[in-house]
Amino acid sequence: MQRRARLYRYWLPPILCAAAIFFASTSALSAENTGSALAAVINAFVGHPLTTSQFNVIHFLVRKAGHLTEYAILGALLFRAFRGEERGWRLRWALYAVAVAALYAASDELHQSFVPGRTPAVADVLIDAAGATLVQVLFFRR
């Protein structure tokens, strides 16, 4: 039973994170569907609507920051899962975490190629892998 508890403790969080990322790849969170919500938030802060080109730049940056952040979180959770009960930082754990996150990012983009309103992008895989890598660097420096 103790082994099963450790399995849930360390592997359930990255699995749930991956599931959340999968949901984010559906048409529900496509750029078309997130634009109006982001516009409302920006208008509340700025006090007036932005021009279309201004909004498009901000919308693009927010979406790419989302990629970086969600995969940084996944990378951190994967590192923790690979590390398990041990403490510290090891290159092996970090490389496993980045590799799994990058493979998941590639599969996520493949998934998006089948979702109406979504388009896959190799650049997104690179951003995702950068997020997973960034968190490993932060762990190493800590």
Image (tube, rainbow, N blue to C red):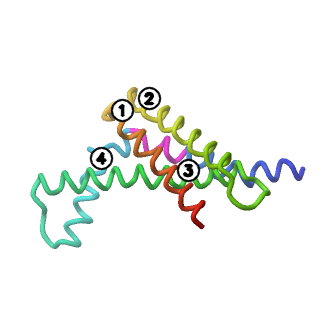
Q: Residues within 10 Å of mark 2 (few under 14, many from 20)?
A: some
Left or right: where does residue 81 sit relative to residue 112?
right
Disc 1 marks which amino acid?
A: Pro
Disc 4 marks which amino acid?
A: Asn
Residue of label 4: 33
Measured from the top left, where is residue 132 in percent x and y? Answer: 51, 49
Residue of label 2: 110
Compared to residue 62, the image places residue 27 above or below, namely above
Disc 3 marks which amino acid?
A: Leu
Going from N to C along the chain, the mark reached first, 3 or 1, is 3
Is the stretch drawn in magenta largely helix, strand or loop? helix
- Disc number placed over residue 120 in the picture, else none: 1
Left or right: where does residue 9 sit relative to residue 47?
right
Q: Nearer the viewer, mark 2 or mark 4?
A: 2
Q: Nearer the viewer, mark 1 or mark 4?
A: 1
Foreground residue among 34 and 130: 130
Q: Are marks 2 and 4 in contact (CB under 8 Å)?
A: no
Left or right: where does residue 74 sit relative to residue 111?
right
Going from N to C along the chain, the mark reached first, 3 or 2, is 3
Question: Secondary structure beneath disc 1?
Answer: loop
The span picked out in magenta is 19-26
Q: Nearer the viewer, mark 4 or mark 3?
A: 3
Going from N to C along the chain, the mark reached first, 1 or 2, is 2
Going from N to C along the chain, the mark reached first, 1 or 4, is 4
Measured from the top left, where is residue 47 in percent x and y? Answer: 15, 73
Question: Secondary structure beneath disc 4?
Answer: helix
Q: Residues within 10 Å of mark 4 (few under 14, many from 20)?
A: few
Disc 2 marks which amino acid?
A: Leu
